[in-house]
Amino acid sequence: MRILLADDQPILRMGLMTLLRQIGKHVVFHEADTHAEVLSVAATHSPHIAVMDLSLAGVFTFDLIRHLKKHAPDTHVLIVSMQDEMFYAERALKAGARGYAMKNWSSQTLLQAVDAVAQGKVWFSEQFRTRVIEKMMTGGDVTAQGLAALSDRELMVFKMIGEGLKKSDIARRLNLSPNTVETYRSHIKHKLGVETGAELSRFAFLQRQEEQWSPNFPTTV
């Protein structure tokens, strides 16, 4: 089995590698810490599974997942992140990921997730599966209200605002012009129903704090 580990923190890649060696002797690991490296490894080595963090170098991997699905369809994507599954897994699923796991889950659960996705199966927690089924039954839509109404790029800008980054910093990190970032900020304010930049900054900061302090543990799958 060829496994691509994509995380911008080497110590976390090492930890995952140590854990995943339990799968068996015939496992080959490839590492990447940027979007470009992920695409290069996928093109060169055709890994069976890409175990990826939700963001690399501070930028969401949703577009990267879409690219892999299109150009490396045999590489299945499992997101392993500290970010709340109940908020981000649906976006990852829509982008083409086949699974989502939290880094604070048990080793056993992470191994189950990797094994399932490597075999082409879909793996999410029972809690998330129940939520998706309930939304289907009620005709719910992720674009209905609040933060779920933001596009992937708008959500990325929102998170960076919550981190306290200035418009110029966000523009540089996302390789955008400051005017484009300001346009995103305007769209975000409209969708969230806030009027001023100060309100937006406060909302983004509070949301970041809530995500950091809200534990999410899996139920039996």
Image (cartoon, rainbow, N blue to C red):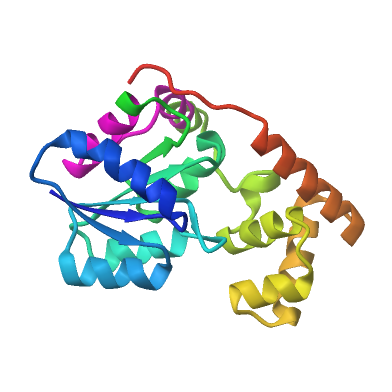
Give the side of residue 155 with respect to residue 202, left or right. left
Residue 178 higher or lower than 75, as above or below:
below
Give the side of residue 35 with respect to residue 18, left or right. right
Give the side of residue 205 with respect to residue 83, left or right. right
| Nearest to the observer: residue 67 or residue 141 | 67
Q: Is residue 208 visible?
A: yes
Asked where in the image residue 181 lies, by quadrant, the reply is bottom right
Q: Which residues are magenta?
A: 109-132
Q: Residue furthest top?
A: 220
* Residue 62 image point, x, y percent: 46, 58
Secondary structure mostly seen in magenta is: helix
* Residue 218 image point, x, y percent: 44, 23
Does 122 lie within the magenta span? yes
Residue 182 higher or lower than 12, as above or below:
below
Does 187 lie within the magenta span? no
Residue 215 higher or lower than 190, as above or below:
above
| Nearest to the observer: residue 140 or residue 155 | 155
Kindly identify the residue that appears in the image at 77 percent across and 72 percent down: 167
Kindly identify the residue that appears in the image at 64 percent across and 79 percent down: 176
Q: Is residue 94 visible?
A: no
Quadrant the C terminus occupies:
top left
Kindly identify the residue that appears in the image at 63 percent across and 44 percent down: 144
